Amino acid sequence: MTSSSSNLDFNNGDVDLILPGRKYRVHKAILSDKSEVFKDLFSIAHSTSPSEEIPAIEMQDDREPFTLFLRLLYDHDLDHYIPKLARGTTNLISRTLDLVDKYSVLQAPMYAKLIPYITRDWPSTLEDWDANEENILQLKVKFEEDPEALDQQLPEPASVIRFAYQYALSEKATQQIPEYLPAAFYHLSRLPPYADDGDPTLNAGDYWDVEGLRTAKRSLLRHQDMICLLHGMDELRLVAARIAVTEFLDRADEEEALEQERCAMQNWWRKVGVAKLLGPHAMPDVLAQCKHLINSLEDGSTEAESEALRQATSRQYRERMQKYLGDMREEIWNSLAINKFSLYAFFY
């Protein structure tokens, strides 16, 4: 097939689809095979003049989602066209799925092609979540002088929560929780109440001085979304308290180590761990806080308290306590949907 595939301008195309500022020369057969609406449209399309061999059709759709829609129909690799960690991704995919419905294209395969790009920004595994957080940390350095601009670039959680129930494929789909949803709720749970782009007080003070602050469009949330959110925030607070006050100390005492090592580990935890998990935080984030504590137990940590702990404890003992905190992070992550945010009970 002779074509300029990336531009959707095929040399051997037999119909022009015209949008403001853009023309797509495409194939009637390919689009008609996937859409009865296109098939009917092409059956009545004629050349605009005797000198024109190829008919042109003025389309009434928005250019960006329509372009992505055509790429879906041509089964293009979408990686280059849907940016990672971008605020507009959910909206773009929503509008594209609206076109899938408008043109009566079979929804399930189109949905299956697009959802991985939602999950890429709101991952289902802790490993991918950590990788995204690291990428965002690098962006924070780039946008250090303009944190508000960074917020406007990064994904927003309330819109993806809204997407989850607006674009459920069927009644059967509503019996399952989309794999991207727990991450969106978790991120929303760590934002302070004023971190809402509809809050008139957001820019009235030093709110953008909060490290890593991002905003959410809470006006998009339903009553049951707020129930899930508040339930999760309370559960995450309780699990942080359990780890801080009892569980880490109990595990440190149970591990095989010299008595003076166990005392040193428990003293370090009371000074560092409890403050990290239960101290006053503008953005409570038990996953990030546990990760910070794991790093504090590393040999390379330069924190004064960590250096003192290394002198008083063996590497093996510290590694076992790191593993405990790592296991707790995995346990928290894996329980977000059911035990933390109660999504199966309330979301649908």
Image: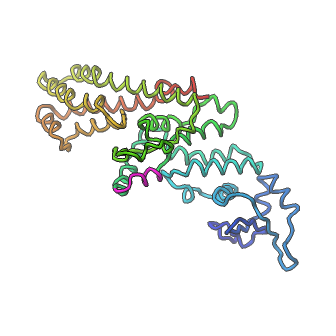
Report x, y in % for residue 100.
71, 49
Above or below residue 178? Residue 227 is above
Give residue 278's position: percent from left, percent from top. 30, 28
Q: Which residues are magenta?
A: 145-153
Q: Is 269 within the magenta?
A: no
Q: Position of residue 294 (x, y in %)?
A: 28, 36
As drawn, 173 above or below 256: below
Residue 18 sits in quarter: bottom right
Figure disc tally: 0
Q: Quadrant of residue 56?
A: bottom right
Residue at the (85%, 65%) spot, across then down: 45
Q: In which quadrant of the rendered image does the N terminus lie?
A: bottom right
Which quadrant is the C terminus positioned in?
top right
Question: Is 18 or 79 nearer to us in this picture?
Answer: 18
Q: Residue at x 19, y 41 (%)?
A: 299
Q: Nearer the viewer, residue 17 or 25?
A: 17
Q: Is residue 307 above or below residue 145?
A: above
Toward the viewer: 76 or 37?
Answer: 37
Tell me how the rendering is colored: rainbow
Q: Which image quarter: residue 307? A: top left
Q: Residue at x 27, y 33 (%)?
A: 276
Q: Residue at the bottom extreme? A: 51
The x, y position of residue 332, in whole percent, is 41, 29
